[in-house]
Image (cartoon, rainbow, N blue to C red):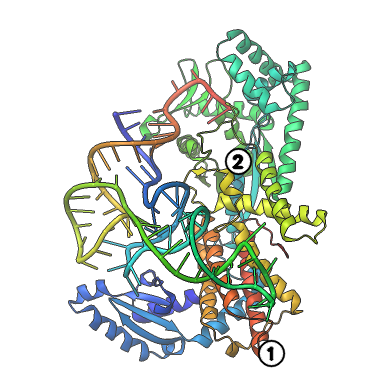
Amino acid sequence: MFLDKIKELTAFELNVNPQELIYPPKSDWGDFSLPVFKKAQEMKLSPEKVGEDYKEKIFNNKKLERVIESSTYLGGYLNFFIKKEYLFKSILEDILKNKKKYGHNKSGGGNVNIFEYSNVNTHKDFHIGHLRNICFGDSIYKIALVNGFKASPVSYINDFGIHTAKAIWSYKKKYSENLNKCYANTVKKTKDDPLIVREVTSIMTDIEKRRGENYRLWKKTRKISLEEFNSIYKKLGVNFKKTYFESEVIKRGFKMVNTFIKKGIFKKSEGAIIADLEKYNLGILPIIRSDGTALYPVADLALIEKKSKDFKNLKNSYIIVDVRQKLYFQQLFKVLSLAGYKQNFFHLSYDFVTLPEGMMSSRSGNAVPFEKLYNKVWQELIIETRKRHPDWKEKKIEKNSDKLAIAILKFETLKISSNKIITFDIKEATKFDGFSALYILYGLARIKSILRKASFRPQSQLDYKFLNDKMEKELVSKLAKYPEIIIKSQKDYDPSEIAKYLFQLFKTFNEYYQKVKIIQAEEKTKKARLGFVYAVALVAQNALSLLGIDPLDEI
RNA sequence: GUCCCUGUAGUUCAAUGGAUAGAACGUCAGCCUUCUAAGCUGAAUAUCUAGGUUCGAUUCCUAGCGGGGAUACCA
């Protein structure tokens, strides 16, 4: 929090709002800046005069004088330079002392938050849209942890919808072993055949009543689906504290619907059960179809009740689902507040993933399954790694490619703002250049390699005198900003902040690496630089962990 | 119709009520007897249109145009 503190102190002593202090576009202009246009206008003075007045204030102030080296006025801005020794010492000691905890804060106050993501449907593929959901959710959850929340990830699996019956209809006819293909086939067939619709309905009834061959097949296929999901979670390194299933909450949901009818929150209309939210400008929320079957809210109500019971003192409940369900969640949360729920509900939305050739959906069967994408990336990596490391054993190549492939996929989905549609181009994603996980991990592997070759042992003290290169100053300023990045990513629920930060950090580092020798440097400089790049590695690994990415020792 | 998101370089994305709007890809030209060249250096091109608020607008407001989404029984 060191840079924050200096900015706060400066703002306080100069009697300005801390938010007025900004970072200049170029680091050689200053460590931070204060625009003085506004003040100049208020006081009817020239900006230059105002700047000079502030300057005088700084150097007549004992507290500021200790940390601020100099200050220059430039075109309406007053730029501040922090004393170099002070900057290096404070930041690097903070990092070397706190290690994995550098940049963490307690702003969450230990409040209990749960994050629900990876809400997948059994009997359908886990595709690259789900990948965005799970990467986003997992990162937001991890960001909450380092901001001092007591956070838990949970998942809700939709294993009881009509889609399961549709998949089973084709599965019974041995259409395919792939459940998603079965599902897509049935959807196509039912379009112009009411007979098949009736058959599907009858399968669904058996599943709901939990009886006979259809129910047995449902259990079998459900298991196949869940095993697939679990292997993907394992690959992605994602763990849930709890997993909920629609089949386990739906019964309770129907009971709750009745209670809500009695409370007057739901009512009958045109044969269906609805919540009329017109007076809140939220339209109509259908709850139960005219044929008596459940829509989403039935299970969701029971799910929310269950989550509240499972997590004591639950304060904030987050649901990560794509933006198309925005209205639905507004409606659902309104219903909950009418029913007297006191906790905070949030829908964290993100836009969907499309392909260059257009929208994808599991219904039409053109969604890219996770496995397919993963294999493609993995194979590209294998080829490239073999070329670069002819001496590596095949097993090592495979293991490294696996870690890299996961890192690349996570990074690709997280580096883009959540309100932007990701157009997933397999060709682009397998290029591994520029703004990508590979660039960052490659830089990090360089640091690790240097530390290995120099037999580096971490020490908490550094001789800062020997860090005189301009690039070292640049890097320290970047390291200093990491705590603010953590806060910002929490405030905006935005992991892309972290991704961008990492890219910038390694852009600076690679430049430094190119310019400066570490192992061959003079002994004292070498020692200082080793400790310094070790600090860079610590911060990088912290940031990567928030994206759910593991570092590699070699690439 | 109404509501929400969105429009920045050839492409994919950044940024901010403030300084010269940044990157990456692609293209071209350099850099490995030196810590990993999946790297570094250099070169061109952009804020949809029209108004308004402001010392200052790409950002905020209004209108229009383009793209996407939602809008009671899809999941």
The image shows residue B3 at horizontal and vertical percentages of 35, 37
Residue at mark 1: chain: A
Residue at mark 2: chain: A
Judged left or right of residue A288, residue A444 is: right
As displayed, is residue A488 above or below residue B5? below
Mark 1: few/some/many CA within 10 Å (<14, 14-19, 20+): few
Image point 74% across, 20% down: which residue?
A210
Q: Nearer the viewer, residue A424 or A123?
A: A424
SS at circle 1 = helix
Q: Nearer the viewer, residue A540 or A197?
A: A540
Instruction: Answer whether residue A241 is visible to the viewer in this image.
Output: no
As displayed, is residue A244 above or below residue A290? below
Instruction: Answer whether residue A393 is visible to the viewer in this image.
Output: yes
Q: How many marks?
A: 2
As displayed, is residue B36 above or below residue A270? below
Q: Earlier in the sequence, mark 2 or mark 1?
A: 2
The image shows residue A63 at horizontal and vertical percentages of 43, 88
The residue wearing badge 2 is A128
Mark 2: few/some/many CA within 10 Å (<14, 14-19, 20+): many
The residue wearing badge 1 is A523
